[in-house]
Amino acid sequence: MKETRERKIQRVIKILRLLSQGGWVPLYRLEKELGVTKRTIHRDIKLLKEAGFHIVRKSPKSGLYSLSKRLDREIEMLSEYDIAFILAFRDAMTQMGASFAQSAQDIISRLLDIKADFVNVGMDFPLTLTPRQERTMGDLLNAIRAKRRVAFSYQGFPGHRFQVKPYKLGFFRGFWYLVAEDSGKVKSFAIDKIQKLETLTDKFQDIPRDLEAMTDFTPFITWGERVKVKIKTLPEATGYFKRKRFALVQELVEEFPDGSAVFELQGRSYPELENTVIKQWLPHILILEPREFAEALEKSMENWLARQREKAK
């Protein structure tokens, strides 16, 4: 029976996810997890390499594989749809000839390289930017990769010129931000407010490991472990959650005869899940776990209701 394209893509995506967990992954584990032969695994790994994913083998004769150090920390930024698109795009371009295949390879390599400098907050990146934003972000990306400080004026701070260490670019609720260190403190700067950007000659060292703890952008951008929230969907919302993924990871745990269901959501921070999923689906869902998260949200809503009632008087 001939294998479908969808099944093959699902399998190579799973290989990529297994390799992204860190360390060396033995070939026999990939065989066991995927239920296919060594030959199939080798073909899939070759496909991923040709698509631009930096998969390395510990030695020519070993059966141990891993992602390059640059990608193993950034691969979660790619959704399954991103990976499927990359593979399908390369496959289509390859069928058009060698020159198209090389062009596809160059495009994919740049895409993967650029994503490593972005901070994912569980939302899609915009497809279009203004010409000025494109120039600003291009200059900032170059500075980030070269580890060079930048200087700029910033709307709302007349007469002041910031000199910062640029670390990352992030996207949240329709706006791009620069995450940078200014006078020992990590701050976020809206890209559309940055003016007269200049790349300086002096360089800085690697990005701090405790960047998340230092930043004032913590509610929106995180680099730590995933957080989990368990919710119960009411009957009118269950169908939507079964058909579409709203969180970084979304798993159906249990269904009930009345049409309600329990889902486990995973994200990079509680505020991310709160703002992108929970609040969007109230009052059609209930928070089951963790209780502390539910109580904090309840208190926040009670405070808002109190202010709203006071204003309405």
Image (cartoon, rainbow, N blue to C red):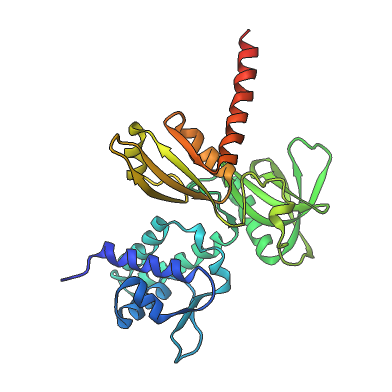
Residue 44, above or below 190: below
Between 92 and 45, which is closer to the camera in this rendering? 45
Question: Is 9 on the left-hand or right-hand side of 130?
Answer: left
Q: Residue at x 30, y 78 (%)?
A: 40
- The image quarter containing residue 148 is bottom right
Residue 215 point in image, percent of width and height: 72, 50
Q: Residue at x 74, y 54 (%)?
A: 198
Residue 228, above or below 34: above
- The image quarter containing residue 101 is bottom left
Residue 291 point in image, percent of width and height: 56, 40
Between 94 and 256, which is closer to the camera in this rendering? 256
Between 179 and 76, which is closer to the camera in this rendering? 76
Residue at far top of view: 313
Residue 134 point in image, percent of width and height: 58, 50
Q: Quadrant of the C terminus?
A: top right
Q: Quadrant of the N terminus?
A: bottom left
Residue at far left of view: 1
Question: Is 211 on the left-hand or right-hand side of 174?
Answer: right
Q: Residue at x 51, y 68 (%)?
A: 21
Residue 9, above or below 188: below
